[in-house]
Image (tube, helix red, strand yellow):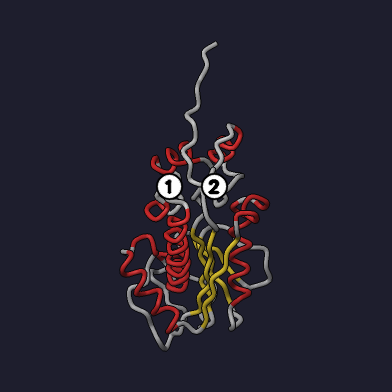
């Protein structure tokens, strides 16, 4: 029977439940990453919860344990081009679809974090705050977050000065100041309003060179 973290009633009570979650809808940079997980009821994992509520050390430990103990798991994504072409909501749903399709066991039912479902044929339901309520969704949130966080730490080496390792691409004050100073890089989402506004002003990355401050004229 599917492992539930609270008294939520799912329409499905069998063992082949896939939990699905995404990470990275809000950031200005990087891919949106999704994961799908079918847990093994005979091999339970302790400590599963919303990945955002776990320490980095605990997430890393669970990341390995989930991969070792789950019946099936998969990580997928939509890249910058797909995000800008589809918009972030549809890109997130598309990436969720990719993750479930990539499982090596076909789930009998899919529980998706949030309030929207991808356009697919899998029997499924959306679960608001599902990463705190359904163990398989919590496991998926951990796989997706650790995967994406590692990628942003690596990108911080390629694009130093933005603080990507710290804020993971979210629009913090540090990130916005760095965009003004260094310009929009190839890993930034062009369809997002703050990035689009910078592009319209010609604030484009030039191999780490500081851009000239903009001179405002008062005519």
Q: Identify the secondary structure beneath mark 2.
A: loop
Q: Is residue 48 left or right of residue 196?
A: left
Q: Identify the secondary structure beneath mark 1.
A: loop
Q: Closest to the observer: 55 or 206?
A: 206
In the rendered structure, find residue 134 and report the number of the disc placed on it.
none
Label 2 Cα crowd, 10 Å radius (few <14 / some 14-19 / many 20+): some
Per the model, the C-alpha gap separating discs 2 and 1 is 10 Å
Q: Is residue 215 left or right of residue 81?
A: left
Residue 215: % across, % down: 50, 22
Q: Which callout, 2 or 1, points at the residue further toward the start of the chain?
A: 1
The image shows residue 38, relative to residue 146, as above or below, that is below
Residue indicated by mark 2: 185
Label 1 Cα crowd, 10 Å radius (few <14 / some 14-19 / many 20+): many
The image shows residue 38, relative to residue 152, as above or below, that is below
Residue indicated by mark 1: 162
The image shows residue 97, relative to residue 215, as above or below, that is below
Residue 205: % across, % down: 54, 43
Residue 70: % across, % down: 46, 82
Residue 146: % across, % down: 42, 66
Which quarter of the figure has residue 193? top right
Which quarter of the figure has residue 95? bottom right
Q: Residue at x 33, y 73 (%)?
A: 47
Q: Are discs 2 and 1 less than 8 Å apart at CB?
A: yes
The image shows residue 146, relative to residue 216, as above or below, that is below
Q: Closest to the observer: 113 or 175?
A: 175
Q: Residue at x 33, y 64 (%)?
A: 56
Q: Residue at x 40, y 78 (%)?
A: 64
Report the residue that reaches farthest toward the top: 219
């Amino acid at each position: 029977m599917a492992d539930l973290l609270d008294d939520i009633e799912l329409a499905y009570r069998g063992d082949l439940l896939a939990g699905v979650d995404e990470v990275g809808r809000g950031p200005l940079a990087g891919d949106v990453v999704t994961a799908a997980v079918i847990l093994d009821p005979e091999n339970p994992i302790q400590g599963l919860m919303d990945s955002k509520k776990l320490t980095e050390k605990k997430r890393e430990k669970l990341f390995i344990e989930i991969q070792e103990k789950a019946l099936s798991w998969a990580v997928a994504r939509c890249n910058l081009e797909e995000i800008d072409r589809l918009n972030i909501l549809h890109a997130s749903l598309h990436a969720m679809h990719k993750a479930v399709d990539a499982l090596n066991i076909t789930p009998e039912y899919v529980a998706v974090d949030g309030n929207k479902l991808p356009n697919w044929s899998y029997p499924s339901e959306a679960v608001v705050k599902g990463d705190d309520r359904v163990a398989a969704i919590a496991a998926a949130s951990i796989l997706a977050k650790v995967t994406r966080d590692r990628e942003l730490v690596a990108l911080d080496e390629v694009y130093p000065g933005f603080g990507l390792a710290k804020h993971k691409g979210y629009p913090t004050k540090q990130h916005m100041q760095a965009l003004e100073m260094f310009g929009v890089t190839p890993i930034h989402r062009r369809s997002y309003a703050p990035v689009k506004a910078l592009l319209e002003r010609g604030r484009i990355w030039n191999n780490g060179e500081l851009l000239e401050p903009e001179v405002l004229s008062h005519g």
